[in-house]
Image (spheres, rainbow, N blue to C red):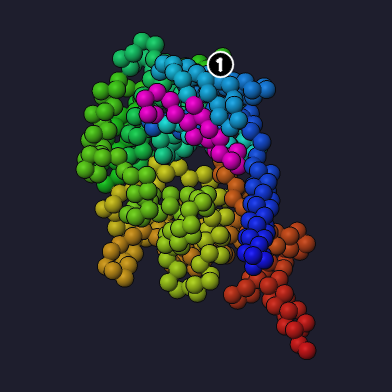
Amino acid sequence: MREWRRKIDCVINKLTLIIVINTFFLGFVAAEESPVNWSDSWDSRWRDGGAVLFLEQTADRVEGTYPVLGGTIRGRTEGRILTGEWSDATGTGTFTFAMSPDGRTFMGRFGTGEWWTAERRPAGTSRTLGSADGRTPAASIRSFLQAGNDTRGGRSDRLGPALTLLDFDNIELEEPNPAERLRYAAVLFQILDQLTFRVWDFRTPENGIDEFTTTLRQAGTRVPFALNMRRGERWGEPAWFIVVPPLQQMEAALDRLLERNNGELPHLYEHHQLRSPRDTMRSFIEAWYSDSPDAGDLLLRTLDIRRLAAEEGMLKAQFLKEVLDRIGYVLWQEIDDSRERRAPYLHFRHPEAVVELVRTEQADGSYIWQFSAETMAGVRQLFMALEDMPTDEGVTPVAVSPFFELRNQIRTVDRNLLTQLGPMELWQWLALTVYLLVSIP
């Protein structure tokens, strides 16, 4: 009997210990969960698009807007659930949102099986959607392309700020609503994205001309597209507008441009195949802002570093990124995307070195475009020559590596310490010498 009682006591003690441990961890997890607060700006997406959503919570009530579509939402919270109604130019309906335990994202449903997801925008992100520069034809084109390049992955709302630079007088609709304007703008961008041209070529015409047409072409196929620009007024100031053609005309033009791609729009990551100079330039720059675990491998694949030691590759890549940021903001549409091109593509020339992309053969016999071996060999010296040039204001900063952070500090002490001596700079040789001296027993 005592033996049975001892066994029962042992089981009870174990169960008590398990309950205590579970209670502790459940309390810890509960403490880790962020309080439910919907007030913020959110990058939201749904099946056919998305919008920046601005929410404000007061007690259990939440109100918000997504300005690019003229949309509003109103709802009430219960725990981590927000339910309510949405309304925009496309219609009205109800929704249910559920916030994640860490408070960074939410998932929702609306309509008949439609989904709506979002994540909080980074701290410090502007609460406004910004504006677009339309003072010259080149500025309008640049602003539209910059906005369009942010629409990858279905984010058509990123075109919102540039809608004020579009002239819709020639389309079939008399008064298009915000959603219809976005649709037309998205098709126009898809057309321009298939072309190769220099924004600089859109010069302000002389002699007071208020309208002109420029013929743009697709690299390789030479398929043309006529783009019309018109001078007007925006917010009481002169501005240049891109004239949006009728939808049927744009769809026919897009079909012709997509013939080289079997009639389909390129996949979101098709450029990772590095089949043109544009593919490689875009892959290299986007890799710096990617959270993908494969981003580093893709970045190094864009570089011809066969003549370099493996550990030098990433350092050379950082020098190249710094150089590109000083040369100027890169618009993909200005880079040749012909898959038939064989000649090197020169992006920048300097007395110290060049930045060029070349078609290189791989071990399996295939060809990809890479930054040339000559570019990688001279990129450090090129960076030193350009170091005093500030980065283009349109470039999004990336985190500075410890090497560049230390180098910048040394530069403020004595620039002569950055003198190149063989494979390293003077300060690196001095640091190596000190390390060896203190390492001697």
Residue 53 locus on image (x, y percent): 54, 28
Q: Of all residues shown, which one is farthest toward the front?
A: 1
Residue found at x 45% / y 73%: 307
- Residue 105 is one of the magenta-drawn residues: yes
Tally of numbered tags: 1
Q: Of all residues shown, which one is farthest toward the top?
A: 174
Residue 173 locus on image (x, y percent): 34, 13
Residue 271 locus on image (x, y percent): 36, 50
Q: Is 379 placed above or below 60 here?
A: below
Q: Is residue 383 left or right of 51 when viewed as pictured? A: right
Name the amino acid type tagged 1: Trp
Residue highlighted by disc 1: 235
In this rendered view, identify the residue nearer to me: 440 or 66: 66
Q: Is residue 114 left or right of 402 when viewed as pictured? A: left
Residue found at x 53% / y 33%: 98
Q: Is 306 placed above or below 28 here?
A: below
User: Is residue 158 at least partly visible in the picture?
Assistant: no
Badge 1 density bin: few <14, some 14–19, many ≥20, Cα 10 Å: few
Residue 10 sits in which quadrant?
A: bottom right
Residue 118 locus on image (x, y percent): 51, 35
Q: Quadrant of the N terminus?
A: bottom right
Q: Is residue 45 left or right of 184 when viewed as pictured? A: right
Residue 394 sits in which quadrant?
A: top right
